[in-house]
Image (cartoon, rainbow, N blue to C red):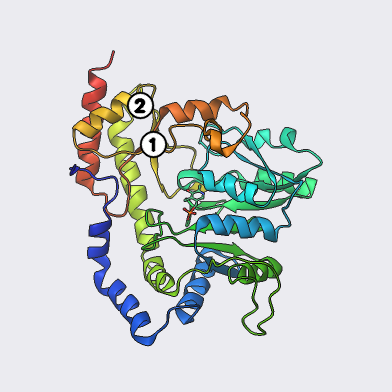
Amino acid sequence: MAYQVPFIDPRSHYAKLKPEIDAAITGCLANGDLVNRHQLKDFERHLAEFVGVKYAVGVNSGYHALFFALLGAGVGPGHEVITVAHTFVATVSAIVHCGAHPVLIDVGADHNMDAGLIERAITPKTKALLPVHLNGRVCEMDRILAIADKRGLAVIEDAAQALGATYDGKRAGSQGRAGCFSFYPFKVLGGFGDGGAITTNDPGLARMATLLRYNGEDRETGEYHYHGQTALLDNVQAAVLDVKLRHLPEWIIHRRRMADLYRQGLSGIRQLRLPHFDQTRHHDIYQNYVVRTDVRDRLRAYLKEQGVETLVHWPKPMWEHSGLGLATPAVPKTTALCREVLSLPMSAETTDDHVATTVACLQSFFSTQP
Ligand SMILES: *Cc1c(COP(=O)(O)O)cnc(C)c1O
């Protein structure tokens, strides 16, 4: 079905950037720059500068960024890693694939990890904290880092949804031992396939990730230092991402403006909770614009009828997927989020008209509610 307001619009995204992107791709293909060439190194340098760290290591997904960062922090069998129950499954799978045990804690009002719940989840087996900066909002990093410092734990940031977001002026992915990013096509910085990166100031962790992504091989000496994986960020993807990174600041401004338009249009609706949380220390980038309502499923069906495309991240709690073998955590706020959240159209291509149409549909839906 053709939506009058698409959730995202990859065709018009490409159309806007076509000359720059085509030149980047053609440059790689014409010169045979396919694997680990200057385009990858250039992108890594620019990404590290943007995030505000010394090193960025390109890998082939956000999942691999998390997996290698955890390995680089020494996470392994017998360890526990504390993360948040309301996240994408890859966060938890990366912990499991290290041989460690994920400990899921509940969220606060802003849908991010409640830092007040961390201490009581720590045991002698705890090795690391894995906060997730969901929907483009950074977690309360000062509290998380203070606990980690006191208890001797590593902090790995899942910043897959928060490239460019800040807390106390510091960018997501710059404060923990490592930051993990995803360049899945529909992230705020997206490639034309899967991609990811680790950001860090730790030269040992950067080197380990650099070897792990290349089957454990040191390309200078030919020595294999680990049983690694085939997980390098493709050079052509890196060339495209390097072009797009230059546009990211303007896209963030645009997303924040769209969020303001949603707020202006929707703030009168009593049955709707909007994602406008305290901004005194935060600068949110709105990877997703997530509203909450008790009548989520009916609202979503209505919007679909009206041609407005929405998504739900995520309708079913992770531990209810029996194949994942996760114990049921006591996280009532996360369970409520799964029932109530709805992501409205939000991307660099979302227009004022798209927001106006969506707002009008929401208003007409709620005007008929008791
Ligand atoms: C997208 C995402 C990931 C994983 O990224 P992939 O590149 O798809 O592997 C991890 N965590 C969060 C919170 C994400 O949104």
Residue in the image at 68% along x and 70% along y: 203
Q: Secondary structure at mark 2?
A: helix
The residue that mark 2 highlights is 296
Q: Using the image as rendered, state which of residue 48 and residue 23 is in the foreground.
A: 23
The quadrant in which residue 319 appears is top right
Which of 190 and 316 lies nearest the eye of the viewer? 316
**Along the line of sight, the residue nearer the viewer: 211 or 292:** 211
Name the spot of residue 164 as percent of width and height, x first. Answer: 47, 57
Three-letter amino acid code at the position of disc 1: Val
As drawn, 327 above or below 83: above
In three-dimensional space, the C-alpha distance between marks 2 and 1, rounded to whole angstroms, equals 9 Å
How packed is label 2: few (under 14 Cα within 10 Å), some, or many (20 or more)?
some
Q: Is residue 117 above or below residue 27?
A: above
Residue 190: % across, % down: 39, 59
Give the labeled residue for mark 1: 312
Asked whether the beta carbons under mark 2 and mark 1 sit within 8 Å of each other, the answer is yes
